[in-house]
Image (cartoon, rainbow, N blue to C red):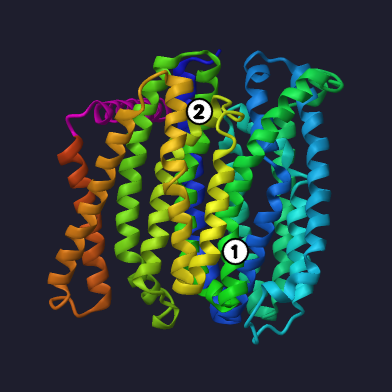
Amino acid sequence: MKTEKSRTVNVLRNMTAGMFVKGITLVLSFVSKTIFIKLLGIQYTGVSSLFTDILTVLSLAELGISSAITYALYKPVAEQDGRQIARLMNFYKTAYRVVALAVLFFGLALVPFLDRLVTDVPDIKESITLVYMLYLMKSACSYLFIYKSAILNAKQKKYEISKIEGSMAVVKLLTECLVLWLFRQFLVYLLADILLTVLQNILISKRAEREYDSRAGGDGGKLGKQEKLAILADVKALAMYQISGVCLSGTDSIVISSMLGTGLVGLLSSYKIILQSVTSLLQQFFNAANAGVGNLAAEGEREKQYRLFQGLNFAVFWVSTFCSTALYVLLNPFVELWLGRDYLLGEPVVLALVSDFYITNMIRCVALFRTSNGLFVQGRYRPVIMTVINVALSVLLAYRHGIFGVLIATVIARAVTQVWYDPWLIYREIFRKNVGEYYKNYIGYFLTAVIGILLIQAAARMATGMAGNPCLLFLLKAVLCLAVPNGLIVLFWHRTEQFGECVRRIGKIAGMVKGRGRRNGR
């Protein structure tokens, strides 16, 4: 079994590499998005965002297989059981080939309905069907190469994947911008994107092969019947979580495009790229910690898991509150400076987007412990209920409240299901403790975020007359967003147990970084 120190080292490596790469990708994506909009226009952005979300819905064919296999790999990786690893990887390869065919089949079945999904896009010169087929090809091909990365995730070597993703992000930006500048053709841009995505997946696959030599475990053979049934049981339960996540993230654009117009999807995509970039940056921390929590769960250490959860969850609250405050206050001013007033959406839309961002990120620590402990079957009907509520409310509210109604439906669906149920589940099944403390803290965390936003808004309104320059006013608001929420968190929570646990673990990681720096200095 891995020691706590080795787990922390791997988490640190994965987190550092992941955040560094995502930081680079964040900057590059803004550059690429700006060039894309300026050279091709917002209508192409809307089509691109819509087809990406449609294929996100088609990814339901994956049904959570990757999570189930990664969880199944924890034990044989810890015990260095080469034959069992080989069996699992053989099963994974076969499963993903089936997934690729399923995505292709269901994707082709949607072609006759494209004219109903894509509306009000008069400036698109290329065939909508051909554009969609290229997006479909990119999605289906990715499943044929990427399955081997599971071994890197199970071994806590996500940082190896991050290295490749970071390098390819630079190559993609340079290539795609060059293609847009030279040809100004959407189809040529898509072909370049497909080739580079396939190349990235092949490179990750090759790196995974070096990490795990399939010959070390022999042919491995096939999994036994009972082993397959156990994995399939987890997959069936995970499918419901997968369906929920995909419907929440993918159906909004489809509803907006079909009912309100694809042009609005283009406007919304400018906001989404910012939110998704920040979310992806934060997600690197959880990707880094996933295998470590999984190994701790395999050891059956409930109290250690609970202490770790206390520290991690408070860190999640801290970061989510800071990011949500900054996004709510700065999102519209940033888009105005970035693209211009013509690309702005109303403040209610920003409120809905940031509310969903806050809820989504606040629940990530809970989701991490649920998944790492293999709680796939328990609570499998919760995602179904959340999905039904979301889709029904999205259609209903779209008629009366437009884009705001579609977005706020997602927030309501999460609030009445996921926010309270998933914490109750992990407290009952993993920690064996009363969940009341979590709910109490959650309310306190939420009120802290709201107070911070109100204070910043009040201060910004007082300073608006003093700062007539939009750039200066943006910088002033940014300083307030940095100081106010962090100051409130320290003021309100510095005496709590979870604050102490969070600071203790941060100090431990900082000490390890300092120690590694001294050794490298020698």
Is residue 140 something one can see in this rendering? yes
Relative height, residue 144 to residue 2 (above, below)? below
Residues in magenta, as a range: 494-522
What is the spatial separation of the Cα atoms under label 2 and label 1, in whole angstroms?
29 Å
Q: Quadrant of the N terminus?
A: top right
Task: Indicate which disc residue 382 carries.
Answer: none
* Residue at numbered disc 1: 173
* Residue at numbered disc 2: 10
Residue kind at label 2, given as amino acid type = Asn
Relative height, residue 289 to residue 307 (above, below)? below
In this view of the protein, which residue sits in the foreground, 180 or 101?
101
Residue 92: x and y in percent read 77, 33
- SS type, badge 2: helix
In the rendered image, which quarter is residue 380 located in?
Answer: top right
- Asked if the magenta segment contains residue 513, the reply would be yes
Residue 381: x and y in percent read 58, 38
